[in-house]
Image: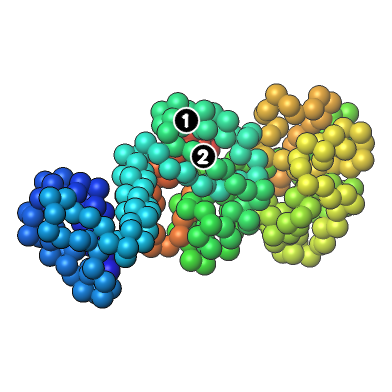
Amino acid sequence: MTLTQLRAFLVSAMSGSFTAAAEELGTTQPTVSELVRKLEVETGLALFVRGGRRLKLTPAGEELLPWAQRTVDAADGGTSALQALRGITGGTVSIGVLRNAAYYFLPELIDRFRREHPGVRLRAVGQNSAEVAAGVRSGDLEAGLVVLPIDDEGLEVSPLMRDEVLWVGRAEAARGRPMTIEEVAATEMIVYDAHYGWTDPTRRQLAERAQRAGVRLEPVIEVEAVGPALELVRRGAGETLVSSAVAASPTFPEGLGTVPFDPPLFDTIAVISRAGSTLAPATAELIRVAAEMVRRLGGEL
């Protein structure tokens, strides 16, 4: 039982004749008749009562009709969905985003893409780059924007830009000089991304730097988001680190100061996709626009 046979049966039943069905399907009457005949042979049941002016369904044909309708409708729906994606006029794009995407480009990206492609639904997923990498690797996400380093097994990684990471403390206690990893280890350190811990890319870089220097990083406070971490710094509970994009945002609290690391520390932002995969046109376009926005922020590699 093939889709072509079911379509020939369905159109014949709806139109009342093989001739009318052939005209609607753009083929010949013998072709339609033969497709239905083969379906009857395969099932061992007659589907039409022949001989009258109009085809009449047998009980077996009546039973098959709604199933044929659902099957043909489902196939046509799938075709339409794929054609919509090809033209970027429909479908859903699921993309992973890095932790602080809102500080870089996310609202602008979604607004611009929706204005240019109003028929496409967007799903932006991700609390941390480690999570995004896992989602792309498993196929739950088509592509993602992440901070490096990540575990890149099975992934294609294309770096886009880098953003300097800064140390944050209260302005009145500002050191006025770059922060060494030994000094970081001696502070009352506040960090965020508590759920992901030291799998977070920025914290991984710090941990590797501390390991090379022979010191240990032991935060006194861990929270999930950067906002509470900065508020705790403002209250004098400790010090933390942020990307330059966060430090430059209008929401960065007053009364806080920043210094660079010694040597400088950078978040590298990259596009990832599964190795060997071909992105759907809508996803590819969203990634292209996102990459354009990221590069426009500066800090190109």
Residue 32 position by quadrant: bottom left
Residue found 52% across the figure and 33% down from its top: 110
- The three-letter code of the residue at mark 1 reads Arg
**Res 75 visible:** no
Measured as percent of width and height from the top left, residue 204 is found at 69, 58
Q: Viewed as shown, does residue 278 lie left or right of 7?
A: right
Q: CA distance from mark 2 to mark 1?
A: 8 Å
Which residue is at the front of the view, 236 or 195? Answer: 195
Rendered view: 208 above or below 224: below
According to the picture, the residue beneath numbered tag 1 turns out to be 114
- The three-letter code of the residue at mark 2 reads Leu
Which residue is at the front of the view, 87 or 16? Answer: 16
Q: Residues within 10 Å of mark 2 (few under 14, many from 20)?
A: some
According to the picture, the residue beneath numbered tag 2 turns out to be 122
Residue found 68% across the figure and 34% down from its top: 246
Rendered view: 95 above or below 104: below
Measured as percent of width and height from the top left, residue 105 is found at 56, 33
Residue found at the very far right of the displayed protein: 236
Which labelled disc corresponds to residue 15?
Answer: none
Residue found at the very far front of the displayed protein: 52
Label 1, secondary structure: give it.
Answer: helix
Which residue is at the front of the view, 255 or 133? Answer: 133
